[in-house]
Image (cartoon, helix red, strand yellow):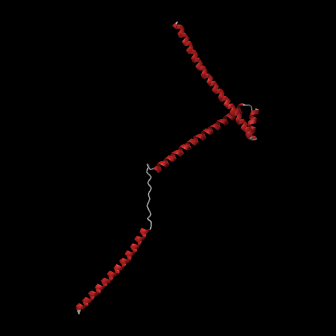
Amino acid sequence: DLTKKEASKDEQRSKLLFDTINQVKQEQNVTSKFVQDKLNAMDNTPQKKVVTHRFEPTSKYVLLFIGGLALSLVISIWGNLTQWQEYQDWEEADLKYRALKMVLPSDDPNIHYIEKHFSVCRDEKVIDDVRNRVAAYEDSIRHHHEMVEMATYKDSIANKLLQESNRIKRAMKSSK
């Protein structure tokens, strides 16, 4: 009877162990199925690609950026110099006008004419007429200056030719 009880206990233990193993297998199957479903879901969803950008000094984007900066710097400097030259021209023109006002008598009709049509009663037709007359005057002054330079140049050439002819005449007289 004792062996029967022990055999019965062994059977119960075996059955309990077998049930526990089956239960663990079922849990593993459920877990395995869950993991498998997750893996399938991961396979079906598009993967996000990790993109890293490295800017190296020799890459074309860095060189284009540096080139663009250099170009904008050159354009900016050129624009500033041009603007500065125009500003200098305006200052010079202002100084010339003030010098004329200083030199000419205060009741000079030309000063009154300029003040009237440029400041008090601004008249664009008169301003254009004055602008054209000033341009013609400046052209005539420039032309006169060019002619004086040309005459000076031709005079110096004539003097050199005269000296050369005198030298040749002396050489011919001395050879006789």
Instruction: State the count of labels.
Output: 0
Indicate left or right for 136 with 65 as reference.
Answer: right
Q: Quadrant of residue 110?
A: top right
Q: Residue at x 64, y 35 (%)?
A: 92
Q: Is residue 99 visible?
A: no
In the image, residue 21 above or below residue 41: below
Q: From the top left corner, tell me how far across and down residue 158 is, in percent.
A: 59, 18
Q: Residue at x 53, y 43 (%)?
A: 74
Q: From the top left corner, tell me how far across and down residue 133 is, in percent.
A: 71, 33
Query: Considering depth in this image, is 3 or 158 the residue closer to the camera?
Result: 158
Q: From the top left corner, tell me how far across and down residue 126 is, in percent.
A: 74, 38
Residue occupying the far top of the picture? 176
Q: Residue at x 41, y 68 (%)?
A: 43
Q: Quadrant of residue 37?
A: bottom left
Q: From the top left corner, tell me how far across and down residue 164 is, in percent.
A: 55, 15
Query: Considering depth in this image, is 62 or 108 the residue closer to the camera?
Result: 62
Query: Considering depth in this image, is 5 or 68 the residue closer to the camera?
Result: 68
Give the quarter of the figure containing the N terminus: bottom left
Residue occupying the far bottom of the picture? 1
Q: Is residue 73 visible?
A: yes
In the image, residue 39 above or below residue 136: below
